[in-house]
Image (cartoon, rainbow, N blue to C red):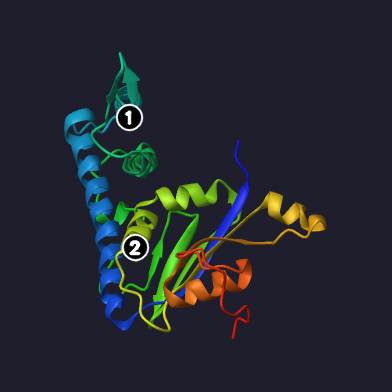
Amino acid sequence: MGMSEKEYAELKLPAAAVPQVKKALRDAVNKHLDQVLAECKRFWIEEAKRTRSTKKYREALDRWDEAYWNSNRWSYGRYSAPAVSEQVHQDVHKILQDLAGKPRQVQIKDLPEAKATNKTVTFHMGGDGSVTIKGRTLIYSTDYYKNTVERCRGHVVGQALFSVLESINWTRGTGGVVTYTNENYREDMSANAQPNTINKCYGPLGEREYEWVHGFNPRTHKPARRLSYR
């Protein structure tokens, strides 16, 4: 069933890493949108046969959806992978459903969001969270709902973000921590529980904050030299 949960991070990026991170997020978003548009157009031509009949369109949509989920399963010890990811399928399904009342070919304007450009500073993870980069500050924030963190980390933006963060050469004065909280943490305050826990730390700033909270270095596991945050 899952539980309500949230992640948050405010990271200071090295100046050289800002273009790298933006490009990784931009490429992930645009690749996903290209796949969504391509599958929509394929459906219109190959599955719906360009029909203008609402009835036939909905029937084609049901067959297409059923075929996807039938392909996305284990059978006789083998996994049958679908042609597109579940996230692409879900976005395509929503677009096609919206057009079922008046069937037509999907256009770029029908996509869930505009393509990212060099000027894009906020990258959305569906309706569950976002990543914003302003200057050298990166803010990653999810909403506080059931399984929100799982969905955000599984989103193409979340996957690209945490992948590129691992490749950064963190320098002095950069980094930070990713904090996590859920309904259990918030209900267990009587036991002196921390309202948030550190899920991940990056760079010198992240290590310093981790030491301040836990009393040891997360990389070397040695006791912190100084417990003062400053």
Kindly identify the residue that appears in the image at 20 percent across and 45 percent down: 38
Residue depth check, mark 1 versus mark 2: number of the one nearer the observer: 2
Kindly identify the residue that appears in the image at 38 percent across and 59 percent down: 162
Vertical relation: 20 (above or below) 51: below
Circles 1 and 2, Cβ within 8 Å, touching? The answer is: no
Residue 218 percent across, percent down from the top left: 50, 64
| Quarter of the image that includes the C terminus | bottom right
Specify whether 20 is left or right of 132: left
Residue 189 percent across, percent down from the top left: 78, 58
* Disc 1 residue type (three-letter): Leu
Q: Which residue is mark 1?
A: 61
Residue lying farthest to the top in this orientation: 76
Q: Judging from the image, what secondary structure is the residue with disc 2 in?
A: helix
Residue lying farthest to the bottom in this orientation: 230
Vertical relation: 28 (above or below) 92: below
For this rendering, which residue is in front, 229 or 125? Answer: 229
Rendered image quadrant of residue 158: bottom left
* Disc 2 residue type (three-letter): Glu
Kindly identify the residue that appears in the image at 38 percent across and 77 percent down: 13
Specify whether 84 is left or right of 194: left
* Label placed on residue 135: none
For this rendering, which residue is in front, 135 or 119? Answer: 135
Rendered image quadrant of residue 121: bottom left
CA distance separating discs 1 and 2: 40 Å
Rendered image quadrant of residue 24: bottom left
Q: Which residue is mark 2?
A: 166
Pointer 1 or 2: first along the chain: 1
Residue 200 percent across, percent down from the top left: 48, 61
